[in-house]
């Protein structure tokens, strides 16, 4: 499979699409937002199809095989690796109109949804019935659940609740050749045949177009309380993380910001920052209010015992909002800070977070970069915002990233904890996966997509 | 792929195995236990190889491809569907000697283990460090962790903690062609390429031989408390299940026994059974002792409010043991009760448990069977022990099982919640999976195993 091959529909294919689907479902001169996602990749697709039902998706895939054009599935466009951008031309297949919540079963604790449902909409609908869909990727106000499943999206809640995959029970999909398949189950368990549902999950729109989902829900926790704790160093903060987890606490969020993030946000922080290496932990617990209030006192005690110089309570919604505002504003400021900003999304074993972050200044110096680290301390997933002062420095950024990724891999980590490969990280993929593993995965892809029409050129 | 093809090693292949591995790793005249698992299938293999390292496994697979013999991987032999029995002849590849716990990382909350580690041994080793490996399949005193992963084993704790798959971070395996691959990560998140680790999980020894695992651990709950509650009917018991879950409680076990189980165990029960439709719920909560003690009072209140006629506390180890003893003894008595006993392992959406069990007497009458139901109320996984009075009734049992499975599928269920397909349920598999899904799965299998040497004839 070559990188981003040109697979535009010709005039016969365009006519066939219009004839099969009707003009109302096709954008013939598409522009924003269909030319981009939340990465820096942009490309105007030849056409956009706004599918309204499974049959529409089947029609598109059948015509793609017949006429030889590329189909690029698209959810909310919040991906950060270019996965839904039509870089080699082709038809963007948007699932946004398939946005029905079919049912939320209180007794069965499942939701049955179409792929275009906005993640937050599902969370709200579940909460209205006393149920909880835990995955909380950063873009959940705009991301679709289908896109979340296609990329196996993460988020702060993963430390306690796991990733999107852990909530996928059943997947209905259209294969690249236009066949409908059901994978997985509507029940909470199932071991019949290979785990096709979870193979589709995280396949980044290369093995099938997700057209329906049965998702696991759990009881909605009654309350959430937060805590922000400032430490003199990342090593101190990470000692607190280990102490919290091994004391038997399982926070619903356990986030960190490094000293550079805090310095950048310094004048805007609701607390003072002690010294130039100060780091922040954000801890949340959810459950019955009296239980978690008592538990948070214990967690606060652990933070103080491991060296917290300042703590800020997050018992009320306003207090929690103030804490998360620190993280959000930091992120915004970093992006405003430099012309080149590249988000990396590495993960290391939890115990290697502090040692890894201690190595970051060395990479900054060697490659002339400014690197900001924040992320999910409870699961080792570190968002690195790699910035450089001028556009001409792009190659130094790339060299620096390769060196950092090699370090991450040497520490037993992975180059992407939750963002995926898409287009952005294809070049890095062979650093992590062996030729034999890539060979097997390409073989699987060919079984599903013999003509190479579904999101060609992406991932590998 | 034909059913159970004869793929015995010839004399040259046998000689090559001895030359490559040494006689000390080979059983030339194997008998028990290598001729069976916990199903009713038995077959004496041609040879047993007792692998001691990854290279041994690679040698076996390379020679299998070169000489054309079948390799059947084996863990603890506790499977219930014949998956590790050499029904068509061939070499049983036992992983029992690869039983080292390589490390349990407190900071990283992971265990790195060889596949032959006994599940309970891992649980104990984790607990000794304040950590918890939650999956608790019934055979965990004898099952291996590699076998658990190969079958994606379940257990009572799934309702709160999920299945084995949810604890698999990374898998090292030898492919059917003898190549070593690493799949997944050593971190808690990872989305690089397809989800090969979870594809291997549950593939029942058909896509690779697992040679190493990185497993997710969580903090060890401080305490566990139990409760047994007797209800006048299964419908009442299931109302309690729904009420418990939707009130925000997440029990670490939520098991049921139907009226026939209770009647069979009647004289041996530590409580009286009110009427002929009485059903039992077993509830456990884990966490900090004072929290769960208070929470169990609330759960008990829900049980009483939904109609429990009797409750029995399980606050102490002795009391918990007394409660679980009811379930264990029931299971033993059922097996002693009839010459033909077949374990089915269906799962239905939680809300369909009671309606399904109400249909069971109809199947008993129609097919002349005696059916005992118990299992995991919190996740809809029902163990049906289908019994019949005489050996000649086997075909009626089979017909009855097909009718039951069809009913389960019509209710949105699955034919196997945790036992898998192996040999036992191959005939039922096409009732659940579409021809297109089976075609894709066979295609995946061919990508991994072009010569069809790894556990041929199993699953599909």
Image (cartoon, coloured by chain):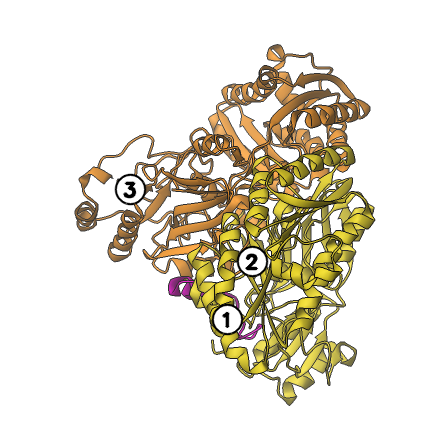
Chain colours: A orange, B yellow
The label shown at residue B426 is: 1
Q: Quadrant of residue B8?
A: bottom right
- The reply to whether the C-beta atoms of the residues labelled 3 and 2 are less than 8 Å apart is no
The label shown at residue B417 is: 2
Give the CA separation, mark 1 to mark 2: 15 Å
Compared with B182, A307 (above or below) is above
Nearer-the-camera pick, B275 or A344: B275
x then y, percent, for residue B98: 75, 65
| Element marked by disc 1 | loop
**Residue depth check, mark 1 versus mark 2: number of the one nearer the observer:** 2
Nearer-the-camera pick, A1 or B450: B450
x then y, percent, for residue B421: 54, 67
Residue drawn at the location 50% of the way across and 19% of the way down = A336
Residue bearing mark 3:
A52
| Element marked by disc 2 | loop
Q: Is residue B234 visible?
A: yes
x then y, percent, for residue B384: 58, 63
Residue drawn at the location 56% of the way across and 34% of the way down = A155
| Mark 2 Cα-neighbour bin, 10 Å: few <14, some 14–19, many ≥20 | many
Indicate yes or no whether the magenta region holds residue B453. Answer: yes
- What's drawn in magenta, residue-wise? B433-460
| Mark 1 Cα-neighbour bin, 10 Å: few <14, some 14–19, many ≥20 | some
Chain containing the residue with disc 1: B
């Amino acid at each position: 499979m070559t990188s981003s091959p040109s697979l535009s529909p010709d005039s016969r294919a365009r006519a066939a699409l219009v004839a099969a689907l009707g003009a109302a479902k096709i954008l013939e001169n598409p522009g924003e937002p269909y030319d981009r996602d939340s990465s820096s990749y942009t490309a105007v697709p030849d056409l956009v199809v706004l599918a309204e039902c499974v049959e529409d998706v089947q029609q598109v895939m059948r015509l793609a095989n017949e006429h030889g054009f590329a189909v690029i599935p698209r959810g909310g466009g919040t991906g950060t690796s270019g996965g839904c951008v039509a870089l080699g031309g082709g038809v963007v297949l948007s699932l946004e109109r398939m946005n029905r919540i079919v049912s939320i079963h209180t007794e069965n604790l499942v939701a049955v949804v179409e792929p275009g449902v906005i993640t937050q909409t599902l969370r709200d609908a579940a909460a209205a019935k006393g149920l909880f869909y835990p995955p909380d990727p950063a873009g959940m106000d705009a991301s679709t659940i289908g896109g979340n499943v296609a990329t196996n999206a993460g988020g702060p809640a993963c430390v306690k609740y796991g990733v999107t995959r852990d909530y996928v029970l059943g997947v209905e999909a259209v294969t690249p050749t236009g066949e409908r398949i059901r994978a997985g189950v509507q029940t909470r368990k199932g071991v019949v045949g290979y785990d096709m549902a979870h193979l589709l999950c995280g396949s980044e729109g290369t093995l099938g177009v997700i057209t329906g989902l049965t998702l696991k829900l759990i009881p909605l926790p009654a309350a959430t309380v937060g805590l922000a704790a400032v430490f003199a160093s990342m090593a101190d903060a990470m000692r607190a993380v280990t102490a919290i987890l091994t004391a038997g606490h399982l926070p619903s969020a356990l986030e960190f910001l490094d000293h550079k993030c805090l310095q950048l946000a310094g004048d805007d922080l609701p607390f003072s920052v002690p010294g130039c290496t100060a780091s922040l932990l954000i801890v949340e617990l959810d459950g019955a209010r009296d239980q978690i209030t008592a538990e948070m006192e214990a967690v606060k005690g652990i933070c103080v015992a491991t060296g917290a110089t300042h703590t800020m309570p997050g018992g009320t919604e306003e207090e929690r909002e103030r804490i998360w505002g620190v993280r959000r504003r930091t992120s915004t400021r970093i992006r405003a800070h430099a012309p080149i900003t590249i988000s990396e999304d590495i993960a290391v074993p939890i115990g290697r977070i502090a040692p890894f972050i201690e190595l970051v200044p060395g990479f900054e110096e060697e490659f002339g970069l400014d690197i900001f680290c924040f992320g999910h301390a409870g699961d080792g997933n570190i968002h690195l915002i790699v910035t450089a002062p001028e556009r001409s420095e792009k190659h130094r950024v790339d060299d620096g990233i390769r060196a950092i990724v090699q370090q991450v891999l040497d520490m037993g980590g992975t180059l992407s904890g939750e963002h995926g490969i898409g287009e952005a990280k294809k070049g890095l993929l062979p650093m992590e996966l062996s030729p034999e593993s890539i060979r097997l995965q390409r073989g699987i892809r060919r079984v599903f997509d013999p003509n190479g029409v579904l999101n060609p050129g992406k991932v590998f």
